[in-house]
Image: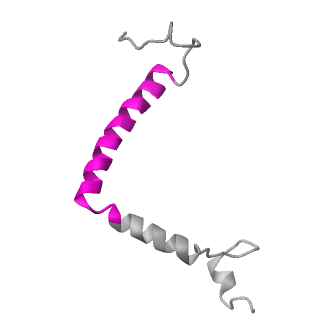
């Protein structure tokens, strides 16, 4: 394999650029998942999921509640501040 004759005009790195491809089975799975995501039912499910994820994210990041201070359920509770 010979180097590209225009390599000096398109990249400054010593190793050049690389292109990576997924194996065919993974590529087909990815294409199928992307087409499934365009389905109205899938969009509705994702809309509810994104709402829940937003709520959890606000709780974790806004109130620093990733972990509970106590062990067990006796003292663990959620309350509004």
Residue located 47% across and 74% down the image = 28
When asked about the image quadrant of residue 58, the answer is top left
Give the position of the C terminus as an image quadrant.
Answer: top left
Indicate the position of residue 62 as horizontal and vertical percent values.
44, 24
Q: Would residue 53 be counted in the magenta stretch?
A: yes
Q: Is residue 57 above or below residue 9?
A: above
Q: Nearer the viewer, residue 29 or 47?
A: 29
User: Which residue range is magenta in the image?
Assistant: 36-65
Q: Nearer the viewer, residue 80 or 19?
A: 80
Asked if the stretch drawn in magenta spans residue 44, the answer is: yes
Kindly give the residue lying farthest to the top in the view shown: 75
Residue 51: x and y in percent read: 31, 38
Image point (54%, 74%), residue name: 25
Q: Residue at x 41, y 31 (%)?
A: 56
Question: Taking 19 as reference, is 48 left or right?
Answer: left
Left-right relation of 66 to 57? right
Magenta stretch: dominant secondary structure: helix
Residue 24 in picture, x, y percent from top left? 55, 77
The residue under the point 75% across, 74% down is 15
């Amino acid at each position: 394999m010979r180097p590209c004759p225009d390599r000096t005009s398109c990249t400054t790195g010593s190793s050049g650029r690389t292109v990576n491809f997924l194996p065919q089975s993974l590529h087909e799975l990815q294409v199928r998942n992307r087409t499934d995501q365009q389905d109205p039912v899938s969009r509705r499910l994702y809309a509810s999921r994104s709402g829940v994820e937003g709520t959890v994210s606000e709780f974790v990041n806004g109130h620093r509640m990733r972990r509970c201070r106590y062990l067990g359920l006796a003292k663990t509770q959620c309350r509004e501040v």
